[in-house]
Image: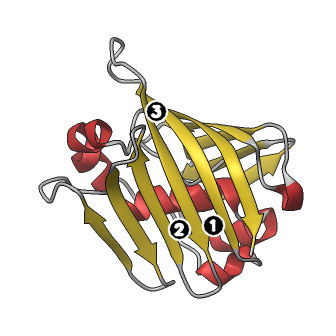
Amino acid sequence: MGAALVCLLLGGCQSRSLSVLSMPALPLLAPASLGMSVQATQVIVSQSRRHEASEPLQSTVVLHVTEAQITLVNLTATGQRLYTLTYDGQVVQHSAAFSQVQIPGGHILGLMQLALWPTSTLQAAYHDDWRFDAQAGVRKAYYQGKLMVEIQSTAQLPSAWPATSHIDDYASGMALDVTTLEYQRL
């Protein structure tokens, strides 16, 4: 699942960035806490749950995680770069193809980590106002008792990496279907 997450095709970001940016931030974990270095290519289909007539949007995400850094590149279906996110465990940086678009980078990375990081690591990171639950292919994140994100994953690739996931991001009003095309441990 993972990376490509969020509403973050350009159209999704433009219309939703302010609501996503005003939400409580998902906990972000250090890149090393994944416990391995990986590279993955995923296709993400996103659709707004707030706009019934919205068309699904598709993008491709290339995710590269090392002990020192997470890099996520989101591409259009034709291969044009929409944005790049990097996170070194301290600072989220982003660059977008269109400078006027606000990218909720921390939220995107938080969703990706919620889908992919080890359950025990997430349980340790979600405390105070946050709560994390996981059982039988379903992960949930609650903020002050309210369900914010639910992720349902199916078939597993090596190292328990999900082959497909469905993400309901209730906070932003987006639904995402993520399919991993390529996965490689580095």
Q: Mark 2 points at which residue?
A: 27
Q: How crowded is mark 3: few (under 14 residues within 10 Å), some or many (20 or more)?
A: many
- Of 154 and 63, which appears nearest the observer? 63
Q: Mark 3 points at which residue?
A: 46
Q: What residue type is labelled 1?
A: Tyr
Q: Residue at x 35, y 53 (%)?
A: 23
- Of 62 and 159, which appears nearest the observer? 62
| Residue 18, horizontal then vertical, whole percent | 22, 49
Relative side of 10 to 34, left or right: left
Mark 2 to mark 1: distance in Å?
7 Å
Q: Residue at x 66, y 47 (%)?
A: 1
Q: Residue at x 21, y 42 (%)?
A: 14
Mark 2 vs 1: CB contact within 8 A: yes
Relative side of 169 to 131, left or right: left
Mark 3 to mark 1: distance in Å?
26 Å
SS at circle 1: loop
Q: Residues within 10 Å of mark 1 (few under 14, many from 20)?
A: some
Q: Which amino acid does label 3 sit on?
A: Ser
Q: Which residue is drawn at 58% across and 75% down?
A: 29
**Numbered mark located on residue 126 in the image:** 1
